[in-house]
Amino acid sequence: MGTKNSSRFTPVVIAISVVIGILIGTFYAKHFAGNRLGIINGSSNKLNALLRIVDDQYVDTVNMTDLVEKAMPQILAELDPHSTYIPAQNLEEVNSELEGSFSGIGIQFTIQNDTIHVNAVIQGGPSEKVGLMPGDRIVTVNDSTFVGKKLTNERAMRALKGPKGTQVKLGIKRLTEKEILNFNITRGDIPQNTIDSAYMLENDLGYIQISKFGRTTHVELLNALAQLNHQNCKGLIIDLRGNTGGYMEAAVRMVNEFLPEGKLIVYAEGRKYQRTEDRANGTGSCQTIPLIVLVDEGSASASEIFSGAIQDNDRGTIVGRRSFGKGLVQQPIDFSDGSAIRLTIARYYTPSGRCIQRPYESGKDRNYELDIYNRYEHGEFFSKDSIKLDESTSYYTGLGRPVYGGGGIMPDVFVPQDTTGVTSYLSNVLSKNLMVQYTFQYTDNNREKLSEYKTEDALVNYLRRQGLVEKFVQYADSKGVQRRNILINKSYKLLEKHLYSNIIYNMLGKEAYIRFANQSDPTVKQAIELLEKGEAFPKAPAVIEPAKTDKKNEGKKKRTAQLDRPAESPIQRLYAERTFC
């Protein structure tokens, strides 16, 4: 009988125990855990409550999904400049840039006069298989007109990209045909290379240009190195100018090819991110080849990991201008609706211990956003003396050479931007995109003749006889840019170079364009000179021994000797962007 009564009260006892446990747990959470969890819960509940109130009581109907989408970037912007929100519709595009491939029809295009113009057809891709050709205009997509002022790159890519195996019907206007041509194209995987160029320069020297650090970049590098080694490469230039970064893992694997075993490549740590180190494992294929790395203000993130590791380990010489200064590590976090954030979780540090992240203030920092412009205005692109080095953040390489934190990788050999031939006329036609428009039309109208020339040198020899600068000036005049003969004469060589390089790009592709641009690129010339002189490997700074009678200033003299820097030279860089789908 006693047993039955006790079992009857068991549920009540359990319930009371649970309630007491909750009360005790809440008490201790509030009073002995710093109330951190309470703050987070309170803040999130406050946000949720605000959204519910707006949805329920606001004077007008509100699209709550749209409101949240707009709020997400604003919240992350309060943290740092590189924590970002990526809407679902943009995530695939963002990821495909680094994943090494995407699914689409396999063309390169530009939008001219409110119409998609096919610049190039990717070899072996779906469009080549059905017969699309450079110069074709896409005028309909799935039987709907696809031209007009509302046509943008984003809208075009959404229409032409799509899951592998799906079909899209294109209506094509071809100059040699009177009627619209229709093509049914089955989308497929399109490789997206991150190494734009790999070729031999001169005197057994190789050149590799890397546009970003993606999933396939290390494999692409190995292939490029094998190709150059087969041609008896004795020295190497790796061009990271304009390379905004990508996967840190790719940069680490690539640096590993050049460093001996045990050398530190990079380390990262954060508030909730324990220090992690990456060291060379000794399997690198190019541990002794003379090496030059080119950087500029567009070189960021993984590019700075690569160049910082080479510099701090005294493995090669960095040439160019100060890099961007991004030393924050982002972790991708996906949401169930297909969107994602890139949240900063750590800072990365070069082997000498410097964090190359330039200063910023939490929240929107206009000075941070305008940093490149401010550098230009301050004269940093043109004079090494304009660069403010923070000696309080000085570190030393293995050989004792000084390097500095607080904002990018400072090159060992500074190369200022060359303004020779730059005039207001040149700036005007470039800003209005007139040279790209003209060279596209010229290429389109002369494609059959231009296709006879298979190398950039042969094509340039032909173009030099065509009087293109004068024809372009007439075209620009018809578009509202008045002829200015004195300025045109001053900019003549640069006008000519821009015109030729764009036509080479249109006809022969990016690598031919890079080859042509490099022929007169002062930064590349500086790198070649260093390699030919045997000066690619850094040397320990000379230490000036003080006189015996000058004990007081002994340390100062030694430090002054360590701060000596190499000489300077000029730079001019061209680049043309196209869109792939």
Image: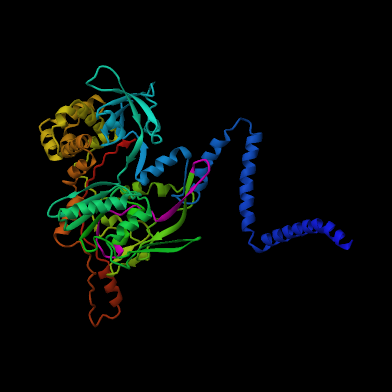
Work out whether residue 416 can be spotted: no
Residue occupying image coordinates x 14% and y 39%: 455
* Snapshot quadrant of residue 52: top right
Q: Is residue 146 left or right of residue 531?
A: right
Viewport quadrant of the N terminus: bottom right
Task: Out of 84 and 408, give the one closest to the viewer.
Answer: 84
Q: Give the residues drawn in magenta, as a range.
A: 311-339
Q: Is residue 367 above or below residue 7?
A: above
Residue 428: x and y in percent read 26, 34
Work out whether residue 387 can be spotted: yes
Q: Is residue 67 left or right of residue 163?
A: right
Residue 507: x and y in percent read 20, 34
Residue 185: x and y in percent read 34, 29
Q: Is residue 267 above or below residue 225?
A: below
Residue occupying image coordinates x 33% and y 55%: 251
Query: Is residue 164 a member of the stretch shown in magenta?
Result: no
Numbered marks: total: 0
Viewport quadrant of the C terminus: top left
Task: Out of 549 and 346, give the one closest to the viewer.
Answer: 346
Residue 349: x and y in percent read 38, 61
Residue occupying image coordinates x 49% and y 51%: 79
Query: Is residue 334 a member of the stretch shown in magenta?
Result: yes
